[in-house]
Image: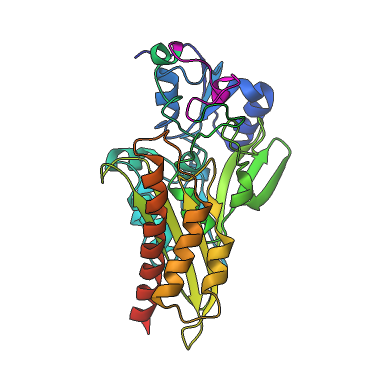
Amino acid sequence: MRLPPFQYLEPTNVDEALSMLDTYKETLKICAGGTEVINHLKLRLIHPAHVMNIRKLRVLEGIYEDKQEIVLGANTTIKEISNSPLMKETCKAVSEAAFQVASPTIAAMGTIGGNILQNTRCLYHNQSGIVLKGLEACHKKGGTICLAIKDSQRCFSVYQGDMAPALIVLNAKCVLEKKGSSRTIPLITLFTGNGIKPFVIEDNEMLTRVIIQKPEGTYSSAYKKLRIRGSIDYPLASVAAYLSVSEDFHVVASRIVIGAAGPAPKVVDQASSVLEGKIPEDADVAAAAERAYEESEGIDNLGMPGAYRRKMVRVLTKRAIQATLEAMKRRR
């Protein structure tokens, strides 16, 4: 399929990129690895007048460490994150999520910024223009209906990014820059929970960095994912878990984040309350998994039935928690 016409822009530095964003705003689409943008252009899901390629902005690449933080440039590839010894040792959930993103070829092209900011998906939306012409316009296409849930007043498209849940479970922040200013916000607050407009990022802003505060004490994290094909597919359900324990193995801090279960990753606070202050037994893990199941959405708008995807959130939560506990036991 041919790409639609657009003006191609290629800034030589970040200031120039921010100036272009400030000039063209909503008519401009940022492209880095291009693994999602090019596909959306071919399917005519987006119609930007300008496409700005930021792939050559080397200042946005790389993984940097200091005593308190790990910083990921927005142009850092998924492959680099997956292969990083620092990420494997310090941020295991992020490393595991990166390892499970798509195929090796796409992981070598795709960037952390692009993976975080990928649009929500739905079988009734992510189709070619020819198919969509035969369907009534849904909420995401500017209509007034949901084709997945009849008479629904909201869009049920699903956020299927791998990296965001794994980063959120480690309380990651992101840096958004625009001409003349920048802001740093918790990554979880980047998401609106609205499938039509999934992010709070403004038309003239660009995601430039992701910051992870290094956890302290004895801790571990894990990422588990359901997909049809084990090597390339988007998650149909996913869970990231983080646990920190005391010397006597009581949980002092925990965080469970579910993905592909709604229009944004969800922090399951009730799961944490079940685990903290205890040496987790099987019953505690099962109770936390049940809280995650209750928080998840299961709509028939992806490649597996919604009810099955939702049940798998329960299973994946158990596996993620058990993986963190086993990892910490091996270090004792």
Drawn side of residue 235 relative to residue 23, left or right? left
The number of callouts visible is: 0
35 drawn magenta = no
Residue beneath the point at 42% across and 31% down: 36
Residue 178 point in image, percent of width and height: 68, 37
Residue 151 visible, this angle: yes
Question: Closer to the camera, 304 or 165?
Answer: 304
How does the figure colour the protein chain or chains? rainbow
Question: Is residue 139 a member of the stretch shown in magenta?
Answer: yes
The answer to whether residue 125 is above or below residue 252 is: above
| Residue at the front extreme of this rendering | 151
| Residue span colored magenta | 133-148
Question: In this orientation, does residue 65 appear?
Answer: no
**Position in image of residue 260 (x %, y %):** 45, 44
Rendered view: 256 above or below 276 = above
* Residue sitting at the far bottom: 248
Q: Residue 319's spot in the image, x, y percent?
A: 36, 63
Which of the 4 image quadrants contains residue 277? Answer: bottom right
Q: Residue at x 55, y 20 (%)?
A: 141
**Main SS, magenta residues:** loop
Q: Specify the farthest residue to the right.
A: 180
The residue that appears at 63% across and 41% down in the rendered structure is 192
Q: Is residue 250 left or right of residue 103?
A: right
Classify residue 136 as left or right of residue 173: left
Quarter of the image with the C terminus is bottom left
